Image (tube, grey):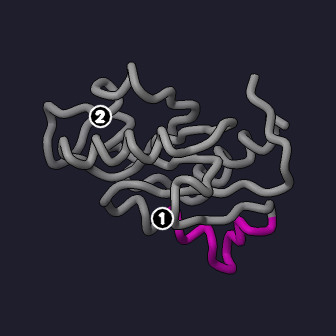
Amino acid sequence: MRQLVKNSLNLFVAGFGCCKKEIYSTLGPTYDISRFGVNFVNLPEDSDVLVIQGFYNRTGERRLLDCYRSMEEPKWVIAAGKCIVDRSVFCQDYVLTDRLKNEIKIDFYVPGCPPRPEAFIYCILRILEIH
């Protein structure tokens, strides 16, 4: 099992979609995810967790793989939202997790359209338990 050896967790949120709003709402005073030492970063190289959400095309897939490869170990991946966990609401025959299963190991799935902030925080707390 991968070990977390620092006191904070940096998240990079990738993708386009409505789930991003719910994920970023965890920063506000209602949820205050930063009290757990969780930060959102703008570069995948600075992140410990890649949050995949929203919808993708082939160009987006390549960029997502570049983001994943630029992250240092240990790293985790969260698939958040119906478009990633199941099927995109925009393209029913397109399942990103099936297309990337040989490239990216997804550690946690957060279902919902969009997923509730509480469910996302629960997932983050599970990652923090690992260390």
Q: Residues within 10 Å of mark 1 (few under 14, many from 20)?
A: some
Which residue has dot 2 on it?
96
Q: Which mark is residue 120?
A: none
Which residue has dot 1 on it?
22
Q: State yes or no: residue 86 in magenta.
A: no
Mark-to-mark CA distance, 2 and 1: 20 Å
Is 43 rendered above or below residue 76? below
Q: State yes or no: residue 34 in magenta.
A: yes
What residue is at 75 percent from the left and 22 percent from the top? Answer: 1
| Residue 114 found in image quarter | bottom left
What residue is at 15 percent from the left and 48 percent from the top? Answer: 90
Q: Judging from the image, what secondary structure is the residue with disc 2 in? A: helix
Position of residue 100 in the picture relative to residue 105 (left or right) = left
Is 91 rendered above or below residue 117? above
Q: Residues within 10 Å of mark 2 (few under 14, many from 20)?
A: many
For the stretch drawn in magenta, the main secondary structure is: helix
Q: Residue 68 location in percent, x, y?
A: 47, 41
What residue is at 28 percent from the left and 26 percent from the top? Answer: 99
Is 53 rendered above or below residue 126? below
Residue type, numbered disc 1: Glu
Q: Judging from the image, what secondary structure is the residue with disc 1 in? A: helix
Q: Earlier in the sequence, mark 2 or mark 1?
A: 1
What residue is at 47 percent from the left and 52 percent from the top? Answer: 115
Residue type, numbered disc 2: Leu
Position of residue 87 in the picture relative to residue 111 (left or right) = left
Q: Which residues are magenta?
A: 22-35
Q: Residue 117 location in percent, x, y?
A: 57, 60
| Residue 46 found in image quarter | bottom right
